[in-house]
């Protein structure tokens, strides 16, 4: 997984695998969430959004299948 820079109060780190579309989101509260089937365009949109945390809530958290981290 490749680490991606993100400037967010809610998200500490983002890791993405282009090979299998897996996304790992490390939240500021210490939780880690893993999703599968995420398009690279969605990940880029999230990390470059004005509010990556809000983008995550509205466009990633409920739209993609969560898997065990």
Image: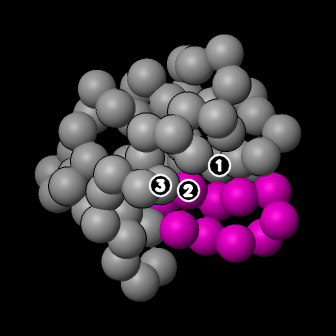
Within 10 angstroms of label 3, few (less than 14), some, or many (20 or more) residues? some
Q: Which range of residues does the magenta coloring cover?
A: 22-33
Q: Residue at x 29, y 66 (%)?
A: 65
Screen quadrant of the N terminus: bottom left
Q: Tell me whether the residue at label 2 lies in contact with that at label 1, contact meaning CB atoms closer than 8 angstroms.
A: yes
Neighbor class of circle 2 (other Cα within 10 Å; few <14, some 14-19, many 20+) is many
User: Is 57 located above or below residue 28 in the figure?
Assistant: above
User: Within 10 angstroms of label 1, few (less than 14), some, or many (20 or more) residues?
Assistant: some
- Where residue 37 sits, quadrant-wise, is bottom left
In the picture of the structure, the residue carrying the numbered disc 2 is: 25
Task: Tell me where residue 33 appears, x and y as whole percent.
Answer: 53, 68
- What is the secondary structure assignment of the residue under circle 3? loop
> Which residue is depicted at the point 67% across and 39% down?
53
Question: Tag 1's secondary structure?
Answer: strand
Spatial CA distance of label 1 from label 3 is 15 Å
Q: Which residue is mark 1?
A: 13
Left or right: residue 35 compared with residue 9: left
| Residue 27 included in the magenta stretch of the image | yes
Q: Secondary structure at mark 2?
A: strand
In front of the other: label 2 or label 3? Answer: 3
Q: Which mark is residue 61?
A: 3
The image position of residue 38, as x and y in percent, is 26, 48
Q: Nearer the viewer, mark 1 or mark 3?
A: 3
Residue 13's x, y, as percent? 65, 49
Disc 2 and disc 1: Cα gap in Å? 6 Å
For the residues labelled 1 and 3, say whether their Cβ atoms are less than 8 Å apart.
no
The quarter of the picture where residue 7 lies is: top right
């Amino acid at each position: 997984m490749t680490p991606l820079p993100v400037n967010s109060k809610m998200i500490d780190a983002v890791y993405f695998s282009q090979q299998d579309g897996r996304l790992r989101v490390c939240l500021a509260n210490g939780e880690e969430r893993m999703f599968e089937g995420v398009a690279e365009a969605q990940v880029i949109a999230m990390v470059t959004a004005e509010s990556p945390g809000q983008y995550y809530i509205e466009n990633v958290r409920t739209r993609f299948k969560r898997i065990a981290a």
